[in-house]
Every structure is written in C-alpha cells, then in structure tokens.
Amino acid sequence: MPTTYYRLLTTYFYQPMLFNSLHFMIFLPVVFILHWLIPVVWRRYLLLAASYYFYMSWNPWFGILLAGTTIIDWAAALKIQNSKLKIEKTKIQIPNSKPQINNQQSTFNIPGKGWLLVSIITNLACLAGFKYFAFAYNTFSFTGSLFAGNHPHYIEAIIIPIGLSFYTFHSMGYVIDVYRGKLKAENDLGIFAVFVSFFPQLVAGPIARFTDLGVQFHERKYLTKENIILGTRIALWGFFKKIAIADRLSDYVNPLFNHPLNYNGLSLLIAGFFFVVQVYCDFSGYSDIATGVAKFFGYNLQLNWRRPLLSKSLIEFWQRNHISMTTWFRDYLYIGLGGNRGTYKRFLLNVFLVFLISGLWHGASWTFVIWGAMHGVFYLIEILIKKNSKIENRKFGFVGWIYLITFHTISLIAFRANNFSDLGIIYSKIFSFHWNLNTAYLDFRTLKDFFPLVLALFGIVFLFLKELNEEYGYINKNPYYKNWLRPIFYTLLFVLLFTIGNFNANEFIYFHF
Amino acid sequence: MKRSLIFVCFAIALLYVVRSIEYAGIKKNKQGEFAKLRLAFEDKNNFDLVVIGSSRAECAFYTPMIDSSTGLTSFNLGMTGATMPFIRSTLEAYLENSTSPKYVILNLDLHSFADNPDTIYSFPRYFAFLNNEKLFQGLKARDHRFTYFKYLPFYSMPFYSARYFSSSIRGWIGKVGKYDPDYVQGFAPYVKNNKMGDLDTLSIPIFNTPAPKYEWDEIAKIDSICKKNNSKLIFVLAPIFHRWEVNVVNYGQLKQQFHSYADLNAIPFIDLSEDSIRFNKELYSDGPHLDKAGAMLFTSHFIQDFRQYIRP
C-alpha cells in the first residue's frame, strides 16, 4: 500500500504543473474548496501559498528568485513613495515658498529615482542573467571571431525560470506606476506578493497591472454562479484551443521546422501557417484558461486576445494580439522613449525600437529580432501609407485579411525557426517558388497518419467559425442562443475535447518567454 | 444552476455514449491489432493450440504455418511487452470466453527479468476490452488506474490517441488500416527499427538478472490453469541473436533452471535457443525479435519438434 501511495505521489506531485496535467486537475479543486471555506482574511494568503506551490512544482529554486524580486520591488515602491512624501511634507512646511529646484541636482536627486533604478536593474539583471547572457556572449564571441579569425566559443543557454519575463514585467510595471504617481504603493507585502505570483497568470500572462488585478485583492470576493459558469466556459474553450488544435498542429509543425532541408517550399509555408494557428491557440488558450480559473476565485484578468487572426492590417493586428504585452510596451517603453512627443522621425524610430525589443523579449535569438524587425518595418509602412493617402477609413476586407495572414505566416517563420541558418533555408525554399502540391501532400502524409491532420484541420475550421461568430454575432442574435445554442455548443465542446484532443501534453510555448 | 447541472450531466452522459460508439467501432475491425484483441478476449474460439508470451512470441510463431503443417488450428496470443504475470492474465482472459486449447505453448524470455512486471505497454489498447473480467483483473493488479479507465471516460479518453479514434472510424466504415494486414491469427511481425544500426556492431546492454520469485509463481499458476483445463503446457525457448545471447551472462544458468523446473513438473521443453537461426542477422528485427522470414524458419523448426506431442 505505501508503495502505491509513493507511486501516486511521484507520478502526480513531483511533476511541473501544466494546466492540462492531472496534477493541476487535483490542485485546482483543492485550492478552490479551501479558498471558499476559510475566513476571508486568509484567502489571499492561501492563494499566495498555492501560487508558490504551483510555481515551485517546476523547480523549487525558482520560488526563491520570485520571492527575491517581489520583495525588492515591493520595498522599492514604498521607498519611492516615501521619498515623494518627504518632498511634499517639506513643501507643506514652508508655506508660500516657491518649489526649490536646484539646477545642479543630478537625476538621482529626483525623488525615488534611485529606487526605481534599483528595481529596474534588479529585474533586468534577472532577465539578462538567465535569458540573455548566453545570447550576448555567443554574439560577441561570433563577432570577435570574425575579426580574430579563430573559431568562436559558444556556451549553452542557462535554464530560464518559467515565466520570468511575465512576472518581472508585472512588478516592474507596478514600480514605474508608483514612480509616475499613478498608483499608491501597496503597504501589504502579502497582497503585492499574491499580485505578482497569482498562479493562473504567473507563468504565461496576461501581464497584469496592479490597477487591474492588485486592487482586487483588497476586495471581498463572493462565490457566484455567474463566475463559475463564465469561468468554465472560458476555460473550456481555452483547453479546446490548446489540446485539440495547438497540440495536434505541433505534430506537423515541429518535424518540418526541425529538418527544413528535407521539405518542399510549399510544405514549409503550410507549416508556417499551421504555426500561426498553433501559437495563437497555444497562447490564447493559456490566457483563456487563466482567465477562467481566476474567475473561479472571483478575480477578473485583463482581456488579452481579441481575435487577432481576423485582423485586416498589421496595425489592427497589434490592437488585438497579446494586448497586455502590447499595452505594457506602449506604456512603459514607447512612452519612456518619448512616444510621439518628439519629431516625426523620432516617433517612427520609437515605434521600430519597440518592435525590435519586443522581438528580443520573446526569445534570446537573432531570429526573434528579425521577427520583431519585420513587424516594425511593415507597421511603419502601414503608418506611412495611412498618413500619405486618404484610404485611412477604407475597409480592406478580405484582401487585407489575406495580406495580414500571409505576412504573419512569413514573419512567424522567423519566430519559429531553430536558428539563423534554418531560417535562411526556409525562406530560400519558399521564395524560390518551386512549389509542388503533390510533394507537399506527401510530406505531410508521411509525417504521421492522415487522420490527426484531418482532426487538426477540423480544429482550424472550428476555430475560425467560432471567432467569426464572436466578431459578427451571426448566431448570438438568434433568440435560442442564450438558453439552448450556447449550452449545447459548450456541451459538444466538452465532448469533442476528450474525443479529438491530444493529451500528450506539450508545454505551452510562451512559458519560456 | 439547475439548467447548468442538467447540461453538465448531459455532457457526461454524452461522453459515455461517444466512448461506447468508439469502442464499438474498435471492435468492428476485421483485421489488425484490435481484431486480434477482440478475437482473444471477446469472441468464442475453439483453437487447438494457443501461443502465449511477450512480443517475442507474437513475432516468432507464424500460426498459419502451424495450421497447414499439423492440421491443428492455432492462435498467437503473444502480447507486446507482456511479463509473466500479464501473460498468465492473457491466458485466463482468453479462457473466459473460449474453449480450452489442447496445447498451450509458453515462449520464455530469459533476458528481461530486470523489467518491471507491473508495466503494461500500450495500455490504452486494452480499454475497449475491459468487460472481460479476467483481463480487467489482470490489468488492475498491475496498474491501479485501470479501475478508473474502465468506469470514467474523462479519465480514460485523454490516454486514447487519434490512432485509436481512427481505428474506431475504420471499424465503422469497414476500412482496413495500413498495418492491419500484417496480423494473421495473432501473429504480428516485429517492425524493424532502421535507426537502430547494424546488429553486428551495435552496443548491447548486459543482462544478468536472475529469474525472480514471481516468475516461478506465475509459471506454476499457468501450469495449474492448463492442468485444470486439460491443456498440455509446453515450454519453448526461441533463439535470440547470438550477440545478445552472449550478453545475457547468466543465460546458461537460467536455461538450466527452467529445464529443471520443466523436468520436475513434467512439462515438455522445446529448447530452440541454440538454433542456427541465431547467427543470421538477416532473420532478426532486433536482438531478441525475429523478423517475418525468421519467424517462418523458426516456426518450421518448432513444428518438427512439436509433432511428437500431438495427440490424436
């Protein structure tokens, strides 16, 4: 008997907690029941403990890093606020006196700036150390070898703590908001810690703002039927996108991108399109599950995806795609760079830099930088076209959608390619236009059985139909929609999930960003 | 809330219905892996000779040749990855619906005692056949999750890959799968792994685990089942490729132990471990497994020795 329990423990509880794992299926109900049973004042601490358990299931050491950055940012924000309050008090003590501005003062004398830099440097140092050190070292080594004429020395990347880019952005955004005076610093470390580590959104977003999520931990939450039903619906659709679409497509995407030399240009282009759908379903699926799970506890997460694959231009795409990241870069990087307050050229440069840095945020590789640069260039082209022509309000319709999907596919190939040389091979094969439909068919046919591909294509059609309905509300207007069609749809979705889903779980792609 | 509960119940009921439809389709396959499992665990059979064992038995005994040479009807019940406890369960499960065979051929594996006897390879393939109580009990004894697999579709279905779903659809539409024709009367050729490398140069692990106690206990149970059903149990040792044989450092000692056991319990032992087949790498898919040509040659050698035990 003890052996059975030991096996059970080692099988389920010493494994990283993916949303689609049995470990999480046990973890969630336990936390849910406890959350609603214990006194209100203890709930946030239960969520904090659960979040750290969730995170440390990946690697116990990651918890120390998370706690460290959390404490530093919490303290930094309080110090910034105190510095500002001291200045205010000084002003109050000398009535009718003009504000004392010393032209000689250094930037560090601006109240709280030093603590802001402490916070930013700490967070960026974590990102740089874990995520970008090997990338920078290898780039310098390669560049140096070009001049020295010797062989470059490469090092392996360090294991990146899961979700590092997300939680550093959560807390860095908070400290900047306190510094800008948009937000009052949180006195309760427990509340700030649970805001940073709240398990539904900890490892792959949405990137939460304290003004959206943090303040909710001060409110009393109630268990409501609406939250449970809505949360279940959102999470169910998220699971479907992840398990029945993204994970099925990965079986056809990975082999082609891992061995691009063996495949036809058309096959690689189709794999690129599959990857577009895969990455969308993977990431938005995660966001949906996170939003649904958060609703079970009464919390609302920010809307992160608004059907980006139905966009008709790149500008529209970035208004709908990964909204929490886009708005973070807008508020903290683009505005920090000067936004549109300088010259027009400077504005364009700022936009381009944001895309370049956002590319690098996604991964420490030049292929991500290329992806960011491509988006930056096309975004600027669209801005310039809009400025210089009177077609601003014209709807591009289907042509615009085709343009967006084609561009997104081509650019996302850079995002997925394993390295620079693979990317060159893929682009040269695609743009040589030696496409052959029969060879492409055989390429996919020999990868795996035909049937999973049919399931994957069914999933894609299902996804687009659902999103078209959400966009244009074809069925929503039906009088039977709310009482009958919607429940039947989600019932079928539940059954389809188990029938056609691929439960041989892949990790969520964005965990490593 | 009441309406929501109704829809949740409806969803769960629908899941049971879908799973039943899926299983029914799987059982409708007329050829292939699932046809073999249906024949073994659900149909009423009347075979004269049944081969039991692991994948080595499954890929070594070419049953159509046994039929044509001996006039008996035979079936290969060898199961991939089966260790002795599960081999015993497969025999019990077979006997649940079928009449007792005259001969039970047990192919021995002397190189795999280090394997965990509780591991069930490709376990989802048995899901559709868990109504066979003996099979269910045998599987449950090895893996406690089989209770949940049997009763809870939301627990079992995630383990079902698209492969099983497509097999079900093939069953319903009466289509034969790509590998289905390979299966003949339970015999299935072992698929050669081209990435494995040359058998003459491949590095081979050392095997030196002694036969564990459960092995002897299970063999005793098989012997008892055969005696109870008036079936003649015969041990067979199919040859493994000579380089593997060398690496089973206690091979001679193990053979001696099994011979002693057979002598003690009056069980005939057809020892083909020293057959010249073992020097021909062209007849092997990998070290322990024969390919189809190897299986045909081995079966012909087996028949020569087996004839003496055929009862009129």
Image (tube, coloured by chain):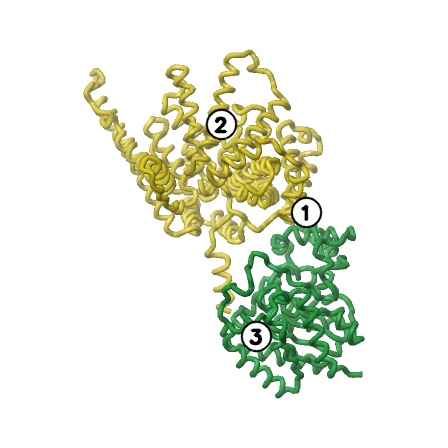
Chain colours: A yellow, B green
Q: Nearer the viewer, residue B8 or B114?
A: B114
Instruction: Tell me the crowding category of disc 3: few under 14, some 14 to 19, or many 20 or more residues within 10 angstroms, Cα based.
Output: many
| Image point (69%, 37%), residue name | A485
Q: Please provide percent x and percent y for residue A40.
A: 44, 44
Chain for disc number 3 = B
Label 2 belongs to which residue? A375
Vertical placement of residue A423 versus B163, above or below: above
Q: Nearer the viewer, residue A274 or B292?
A: B292
Vertical placement of residue A408 versus B289, above or below: above
Q: Which mark is residue A373?
A: none
Query: Image quadrant of residue B199?
Result: bottom right
Vertical placement of residue A292 versus B92, above or below: above
Q: Please provide percent x and percent y for residue B252.
A: 54, 80
Q: Please provide percent x and percent y for residue B309.
A: 73, 83
Q: Would residue B134 be visible to someone looking at this image?
A: no
Label 1 belongs to which residue? A451
Could you say whether the residue bearing mark 1 is in a helix, strand or loop? helix
Question: In 3D space, how far apart are the residues under numbered discs 3 and 2 (Cα atoms)?
Answer: 62 Å
Amino acid at circle 1: Phe
Q: Please provide percent x and percent y for residue A185.
A: 33, 33
Question: In 3D space, how far apart are the residues under numbered discs 1 and 2 (Cα atoms)?
Answer: 35 Å
| Image point (39%, 52%), residue name | A60
Which numbered mark, 1 or 3, is in the foreground of this view?
3
Q: Is residue A368 left or right of residue A502?
A: left
Q: Please tell me which of labels 1 and 2 falls first in the chain.
A: 2
| Image point (50%, 64%), residue name | B203
Which numbered mark, 3 or 2, is in the foreground of this view?
3
Amino acid at circle 3: Leu
Q: Quadrant of the C terminus of chain A?
A: top left
Chain for disc number 1 = A
Could you say whether the residue bearing mark 2 is in a helix, strand or loop? helix
Label 3 belongs to which residue? B110
